[in-house]
Structures are given as structure tokens and as C-alpha cells.
Amino acid sequence: MLVALITGIAVCRLIPTRTGEILLGYAVLAAATVWALRGRWIALGATMSVLAVATAASLTWPVHHFVVFTHLHNIVPLVFLWEWTRSAATRAVTVGWVLVIPAALLLGFADALLRTDGPAALSPAATTLLEGTMATRFLAVFAFLQTMHYVVWVWLFPRYAPSAGARVPALKGWRAWGLGAAAAVALGVILATDYASGRGVYASLATYHAYLEFPVLLTLLFSLQKGQS
């Protein structure tokens, strides 16, 4: 069911239609909530009410919705890393790159390294809601967190949590690297030929990764809450 809903979001990104993507995105969260909170009717009702209010807000301010989603997606690894490790040092480092460094960028500590006359306004991470220096700062935050996001999923977890990779034995070793390289080359060719189309294809394919994280995150949080109660 989740895969079908997210496939619908991928199609919406190719069309594109903002309203469809927003509604299907919240449908994914609702489906995950119903599954994770089955039998816990009060918590389910409260969470669904919050999702209903959030849906209405997103439909009213769709530009804000996608800006917030873009940045929230990049900080999701904080929760997974926090739960995965019990090391105080690792948690402190994680909080540092997820919260402290982005805050420093937004406060202007790296302005000397940033260009304010670049294509910041072209990125939804920078947002058309802001202009000039702040738009560039938001774009820098996005670029940094996106890089760290991939570091966590592509390097850290496969290296230090091999049990996760063992669930798909066919995608181990050279096969995983070969598939990644082939996909990168194919996407690179599309981007070089038609950059706008390449971005659309990448956004559509990345839909599965981006939107699957949130229901998994909700399930994790609800499971932790249930275990503590």
C-alpha cells in the first residue's frame, strides 16, 4: 500500500502537481499511523487530527510545505542515528552536524565562503520565500545536510550496521556499486542532455527514498513510545 501511494507521488512529481503530491504524502503518513497505532485508539485519533490540520496548512501554503519537507527530509537520520547508537560521543557529533553547523550557516558564520549572486533562488531548498543572503544561507544548509544525509545512508549504515544490508544479499559487494554507478551514469547523461528533465527524473526516483523514511520514522517513534509505556 505504501509503495503504491509513493508511486503515485512519483508520478505527481513528473507531471507535476503540487496538490496531488501533498495529499498522497499525507496519505502515506496516515497509512503508517493506522498501522503503527492499531488498537491504540486515543493516540490514533490525536495523531490523525494533527495530520488533518497539517494537511490543511500544507494545502493553504504549498510553497512553505515543500520548503519544510525538503529540510526535514535531510534531518531524519538524526533520529535513526540517535536510536541506533548508545554512544554519547556519537550522539553529540550527530547533533553537531544536524543542528549546530546549520545554525551557524544561517547565522552567517560562513558568508565569506558563499556567493549571494549565484542560482540560490532556483532551488526549492533556498526557497522563493526569501531573497539574497538568507536564500543563499538556506541553500548552503540544504547542500550540507543533503551531503550528510547520503553519508549516513550510503556509507555509515552499510559499514557499521551490516545486518541491514544482509536483508538484500543480491545487492552486496560489486553488485551494489555497479548498480549505483550505472544509475549515476544514466542520470548524468540525462542531466547533460536536458537538465530540467534530469532533475525531474531524479526527483521522481528519489521519491521512494524520501517518502519511505517518514512512515518508517513514525513507526519507530510509536514503537519506542509503546515500549516505554
Image (cartoon, rainbow, N blue to C red):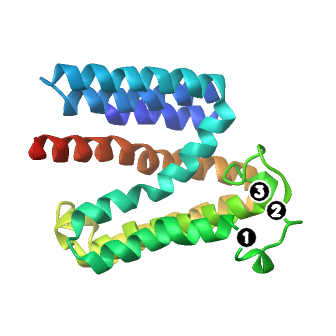
The structure residue drawn at horizontal position 65% and vertical position 37%, both measured from the top left corner, is 64
Q: Work out whether residue 177 or residue 27 is closer to the camera in this orientation and state it.
A: 27
The structure residue drawn at horizontal position 25% and vertical position 24%, both measured from the top left corner, is 44
Q: Residues within 10 Å of mark 2 (few under 14, many from 20)?
A: some
Disc 1 secondary structure class: loop
In this orientation, does residue 88 appear? yes
The structure residue drawn at horizontal position 54% and vertical position 20%, both measured from the top left corner, is 56
In the displayed structure, 147 sits above or below 33; it is: below
Between the residue at mark 3 and the residue at mark 1, the CA separation in whole angstroms equals 12 Å
In this orientation, does residue 175 appear? no
The reply to whether dot 3 and dot 1 touch (C-beta < 8 Å) is: no
**151 sits left or right of 162 in the view:** right
Residue 108 numbered mark, or none: 1
Q: Residues within 10 Å of mark 3 (few under 14, many from 20)?
A: many
Residue 135 numbered mark, or none: 3
Q: Position of residue 157 (x, y in %)?
A: 30, 71
Image quarter (top left, top right, bottom left or bottom right) of the C terminus: top left
Q: Which residue is mark 2?
A: 133
The structure residue drawn at horizontal position 73% and vertical position 48%, both measured from the top left corner, is 127
If you read the primary sequence from the N terminus, does the residue marked by circle 2 or circle 1 appear first? Answer: 1
Q: Work out whether residue 76 or residue 195 is closer to the camera in this orientation and state it.
A: 76
Q: Position of residue 7 (x, y in %)?
A: 44, 35
Q: Position of residue 213 (x, y in %)?
A: 37, 48
Q: Residues within 10 Å of mark 1 (few under 14, many from 20)?
A: some
Amino acid type indicated by mark 3? Ala
Between the residue at mark 3 and the residue at mark 2, the CA separation in whole angstroms equals 5 Å
